[in-house]
Image (cartoon, grey):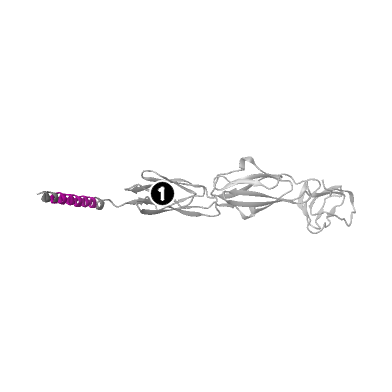
Amino acid sequence: MERKIQSRILGLAALAVCCQGFLLGTASCNKEPAQLSLQYTSVSFGCMGGRESLSVSANYPWKATPASDWVVADCGESSLSLTVSPNTSSGSRKTQVMVECEGLRVTLTVSQDEALLSLSEDSYSRMLLGEEGGDFTLPFSTNVDGTEASSSVPWISILPSSKASDLHPGSVSFRVQPNPSFDDRSGEITLSALSTITTVKITQSGSPRVISIVHSLERFTLPSFGDGTYGYLYWDGTQGKEDYEKGLTHEYASSDQHRVSLHLHGAAQVSFGDLFGVSELDLSGMRQQ
């Protein structure tokens, strides 16, 4: 009798174990497969970066891991926010964000534009300015908000109101001081937009050497002051400005006294072959100030 009771107990225990295994197996088979989908599989940013969000659909907890440190991922309940820093590299860039849910993976591609900066015209890359100086504007095009400008020499100053510009295109204004020297001088203006740098060479003419001649000739011919000499002159004071040319002749209506004022560049030495009719010759402007 005791043996029969023990056999029944053992049988019931075995049956319970089998049922438990069946229940566990049934529960395991009924687990819903992981599902994961993104609103986009790729997203792009401008060179200044920024923040953008996209929706995420998943039936289990999920996470997002960027492959580069210039992307920060913030995971919400059903959204993914990406924060991208400004692009300071030398070109466009691209990376990936891995989104995972219960072993299921979806790759999100993140791309970013490069910083662009260009002068509006090729002629602005080298500027030749007169000895008098003045205020000038340098136009450019860029996709960067906030372009910095700097000068390499003290006689070129960036005007405060134009130091940075978020215009597309934009411009920078600068001031050039008069050149007190006879010699030409050069400096540079550097424009910086994130990682992109553009340099503009500024060359300023030296002050001209001034020669004043008073004569009473009805026909006056300028002598040649050598190769490389250029400039301008005034007939009778400030009237009749003309560009200097070798052998330039001017005719007057009378033989009264007339004044010729020469403003020459590159004329370190001068010589006059014939001073007939000349009553005054002032060469003091040939000396360095």
The residue range painted magenta reads 7-26
Indicate left or right for 123 with 37 as reference. Answer: right
- In the rendered image, residue 137, in percent from the top left (x then y), is placed at 64, 46
Residue toward you, 55 or 141: 55
- In the rendered image, residue 244, in percent from the top left (x then y), is placed at 78, 54
Of the residues shown, which amino acid type is indicated by label 1? Answer: Ala
Tell whether position 111 is magenta. no
Residue 271 sits in which quadrant? bottom right
Indicate left or right for 1 with 82 as reference. Answer: left
Q: Secondary structure at mark 1?
A: strand
Q: Which residue is mark 1?
A: 64
Q: Main secondary structure of the magenta part?
A: helix
**Residue at horizontal 36 percent and vertical 45 percent from the top:** 78
- In the rendered image, residue 5, in percent from the top left (x then y), is placed at 12, 49
Residue toward you, 177 or 229: 177
Q: Where is the C terminus found, in terms of image quarters?
A: top right
Judge whether residue 261 can be spotted in this image. Answer: no
Tell whether position 20 is magenta. yes
Residue toward you, 138 or 107: 107
- In the rendered image, residue 143, in percent from the top left (x then y), is placed at 53, 49
